[in-house]
Amino acid sequence: MEKTVGIIGLGNMGKPMAENLLKTFSVVVYDLNSAAAGSLQRLGAELAKSPRAMAAAADAILLSLPSAKEVEAVMLGNEGVLSHPEVAGRVIIDLSTSRPALTRKIYAEAKKLGAHFLDAPVTGGKKGAVEGSLTLMVGGDEEIFSAHSDIFHAIGKNVFYAGPSGMGHTAKIIHNLVSASNIAILAEAFVMARKTGVDPKVMIDIINNGAARSYMSETKDTPTFCRTDSKGRQPSIFRSRIWGWPWNWPVLPECRFPSAPWYPRSTRWPGLWVSETKTARVWSKPTTSWPEGSKAFRIEDAIDL
């Protein structure tokens, strides 16, 4: 019998993943944005009225949501997936970037109800979602992972089993740490280039044709490192769905073009620490410059936040 796959969340990543799933499966979709859901309906998908209703409509349910907050609401809320009496036997696969501790909580709750929960965050961006070439790192019961490999390969090219529940999201945090650090050092490089008189556009070509090239240097253009809003504030260009890195830190004059993306002063404190306000910043030791009401601790201590 043909497997029915549901997907909740039809944003930049969810919509193209749903389109790829339609090539292989019967698909049911749900999104708060009715227009997004309607566009998938026109391609042949069925519509679910709520996350709760999805539990009765699909054999496997995928989540592609902005943050852990939405994942928790969709799974554990009054109208969440796990609230439906027919959820037993269903497999829920969280493609979002979320918190390992929450993941393990949902896994345990699902198991009590006879359902299965896998954490399977993705990397590869919108391009990978459109092309079906995403990389997935999956945590949860290995036999459930193996039984649903057809779903993973419908949306991704590289699929890795990372271990028990929460290990997929843990791997994604570590992956994001490396990616964010790469962006940060590129921003530092452009600050240095500008201050010393090297054209940033020339500098990026040099980097991309040398040993320093990376996915981030090849896919982010130089304006990415110097965007500001109407008030002259620098948005984070690597805004974490886990820690909610802020959009309102001021851009220092010496870094205005380009500017370090998620820490305020160039090359002042290397190394990554995390604040109790769940805001990632680059520090090598505790400092008095943290946001009000917070203190520093190591990234290793924050992985279960």
Image (cartoon, grey):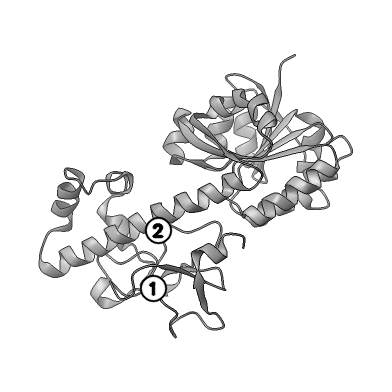
Q: Quadrant of residue 30?
A: top right
Q: Is residue 142 visible?
A: yes
**Image coordinates for residue 251, horizontal then vertical, percent:** 34, 73
Please identify the residue farthest to the left as the structure is shown. Answer: 197
Q: Secondary structure at mark 2?
A: loop
Write the residue at 22% across / 66% down. 191
What residue is pinned by disc 1? 284
Q: Could you tell me the amino acid type at mark 2?
A: Ile
Q: Quadrant of residue 37?
A: top right
Q: Is residue 189 above or below residue 39?
A: below
Q: Earlier in the sequence, mark 1 or mark 2?
A: 2
Q: Is residue 96 visible?
A: no
Residue 237 got which mark? 2
Q: Could you tell me the amino acid type at mark 1?
A: Ser
Mark toward the viewer: 1 or 2: 1
Q: Nearer the viewer, residue 180 or 251?
A: 180
Image check: 154 left or right of 268?
Answer: right
Q: Residues within 10 Å of mark 1 (few under 14, many from 20)?
A: some
**Image coordinates for residue 226, horizontal then vertical, percent:** 30, 63
Q: CA distance from mark 1 to mark 2?
A: 21 Å
Write the residue at 46% across / 69% down. 273
**Image coordinates for residue 16, horizontal then vertical, percent:** 52, 33
Q: Nearer the viewer, residue 84 or 160?
A: 160
Write the residue at 67% across / 46% down. 32
